[in-house]
Image (cartoon, coloured by chain):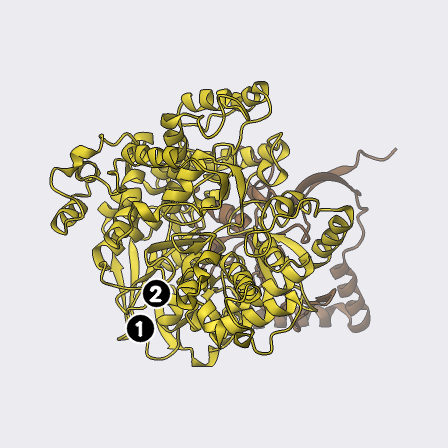
Amino acid sequence: MRYAETGFNLEIDLTRGNIERVATDPELTKLHLGGLGTNAKLFWDRVGPEVSHFDPENLLIFGTGLLVGTPAPSSNRTVVSSISPQTRLFAFSIMGGFFGPELKRAGYDKIILRGKSEKMVYLWIHDGKVELRDGEHLRGLGSLETAEAVRMELEEPNAAVSSIGLAGENRVFFASIEQGRSSASRLGLGAVMGDKNVKAIAVRGTKDIQISDPMAFMKLCNESLHYIKEREKNPVKGVMPILAGLGSPQEMAVDDEKWHTENFMWGNARTRRKGFWTEDIAEQWSHTMHTMRTRLLSCYNCPMKCGAAISVDSRLCSYMMKCFSKLTYTMGAFADLDFGLRIAQKATEHGVDAFSAPQTMAFAIELLEDGILPASEFPGMPEDSEGRFYWLLDKIVRREGIGDVLADGTHWAAERIGNGAQAYAHNNIKKTEQLPLKLGMLNHMYFLMYSTGEKVNITQIEGNFPQAPFMTREENEEFTKDWPHVPDDRFKRWFEDWELRGENSIPNYPHTEAACEIVNWQEQMHYIDDSIGLCAGLSSFPLKPPFHIHNIPTLISAGAGLEMDEETLKFVTRRNRDLVRANNIRRGMRREDEKPPEDHWKRRFPELEEQLLTDYYLFKGWNEDGIPTEESLRELGLDYVAEEFLETGILKAGGAAAAATGGAS
Amino acid sequence: MSEPKKKKTIKRIIIDVDKCNGCQGCEVICSAFHATPQYSSNNPERSRIRVIRDPLADIYIPVYAGEYTAAECAGRDKYMIDGKEYEECAFCRASCPSRDAFKEPDSGLPLKCDMCESDPTLDEPMCVQWCLAGALVFDVREEEVEEEEQEPEELDLGIEALANRHGWETVLAAVSRLSKKDD
């Protein structure tokens, strides 16, 4: 009997049209849980470094977290994994919504797509019945249009549909996979789906999901809901409103955008607009939100309302939006919120990532203005900023003219354009566009998170530790009073002693050992969520969440029937973390790839940064080049990784001596 | 003076469709609560509350399972409210041959909301406890029920009317004949 998971994967060979239901090894659940962990294992086993993103051998996996579909609030996440056209590394992009639980109820933990279909198809999974259906008639439709068309055709209004728009079909390197309420947007996995000629996956499941120890599990679920209720009534004081509560940043609910519009950068992540947020703007933007936002929305079985239905025309809901996509188009184009919400409707139908797309368009405008790209590359483009963005979006998703170059994202477009364009792709990590955030003093903990994150997205690494200390020690102490979430009490002391200015401030305090522990803790929580399928919004992302390192082990043991305690969970998470890294090391990722944008902070400390990175690597059980050591790999039971690394010369025999024993727990 | 009036407990769930955001948490917990053993599994298909969701039409209506009916209505209704087009019989609670809702997926047997009747009694049905959005609110009130005078029942009046018209003998013969036919 398998609990929480189904014990079966769907293996789809698109080249041959073959579909198999394959039983999975329960040992793998013990070793890797599910979601990201088992996705990483499948990639290690099947996708060697010689496979590139658009090869048929590349896999596209939709993997549900271990607890997805159980009553645990927010356990609805699907981890989509593939080799990314942008980073050329093992990518994972995570979506909430309704897809994962539906897939579980249909009787599968993962969908594993391999090969390429000759014709456009869509996959229809209805419990035990699975078929590849002709999708040629869906070609060119938007992502939401596709989902609606598929539901109509199947006469299944309740089917959960993941689909791509034009951008995915045309293999835009930052194409997303859209799912209505949610999306897997980062790292261009929609392009891989398009390359495989899969327009959509529709799922309908009507089976039960079993729980191992129902009473213990429900006790925790009820406690978490009770905690959420109380926590929402008592927001954390002294932090900006979007960080005070739970969930992902409450961009849909909060109208006040002074902080983002005056501290984040506009255009191609360069221009700060101090004093932008006037009373007039506040009133105008609130009006936009109140007229266009028709309802706040949840994902499956979650009490938070991080998304919203946005209405841009006579339809009641034109599309669904979440988080910071609210502002990226507006700020990229130096426009107003009305424009941002309107163009995001088109962008969502086309299926593009809301960080990379506007950044790439702003990059193109800069190249034009600075004469690096000639005006002749932009025939017929309107003069006004908003018109230009619509024009560019259209060219990109169709890969027409200059759009074909820009569709590769800023890094690869700059390589193709040359002529100094590389300097304009300045806001990237690992070839991927980042939040348009430029700050003063180096924050050494964020330096480590930005550098070593393999989701390549800061919000997927940061979270449980406050971004900054409060004004006074008394406030710090007030904060740590009810903070049982920390792994141990040292974390409280580090926070209490932390100061905004003076000796105990960034970049020297928290000192190196503490910084490593703090970064490791935050990342660890994300890796746990990504393997069990809890949303970061109720666990690894906000301050003082309902789920944390002390109660998640019980959730896993009572839910899935695995023997689990804190130490074991930390150990399994370290194994998953290193397996993700091993996939990327094998693909050539090294220390020199691990750096934030040059201009992320004004005040940099090159020597300190190098030392920090080395110390953190050693703390993690990696060598000075960021490669997990033989000793560390063997300790984690990843001997097969160690052996391949030794065989291929990635690790030298006895080289582990260079690294201290892994201190990360 | 009249006798003390009889009291009847009315349990009610107030459904605020404007507050529903479609998470289906009510379906998850309802099906888990009613699973055997309790909470051992969940499956919204077995839930006694269903959220009719049509996100692009902005439709989110929680509907509770009511009585089983052997036959569907003579006609169907379709509501249009504020420009929203609701599906046929959207607001109906019946477990009815016209649709799949409120039937056990394996057996097809009807499902009916029992307000989470259990021992010990819950303060609120589980769906209400789990709806943090406040779309489902539980209240209980007592209604006084009038002690009705022993008025002739409708059936008595009808039969009396028939006897007046046709004579008792004819009516009794007809009743006896018809009741045999039904066997």
| Residue that appears at 34% across and 37% down | A610
Residue for badge 1 = A116
| Residue that appears at 45% across and 58% down | A99
In this view, A212 is above or below A516: below
Q: Position of residue A130 (x, y in %)?
A: 35, 69
In this view, A73 is above or below A198: above
Q: Tell me which amino acid carries mark 2.
A: Gly
Instruction: Tell which residue pokes out farthest to the right in this image.
Output: B1
| Residue that appears at 51% across and 49% down | A435
Looking at the rendering, in which quadrant would you find the C terminus of chain A? Answer: top left
> Is A289 placed left or right of A135 in the picture?
right
Residue for badge 2 = A128
| Residue that appears at 78% across and 50% down | A280
The tint of chain A in the picture is yellow
Q: Position of residue A47 (x, y in %)?
A: 24, 59
Query: Given this view, does label 1 or label 2 mark the residue nearer the observer?
Result: 1
> Do badges 1 and 2 share one subunit?
yes
Closer to us: A515 or A416:
A416
The tint of chain B in the picture is brown
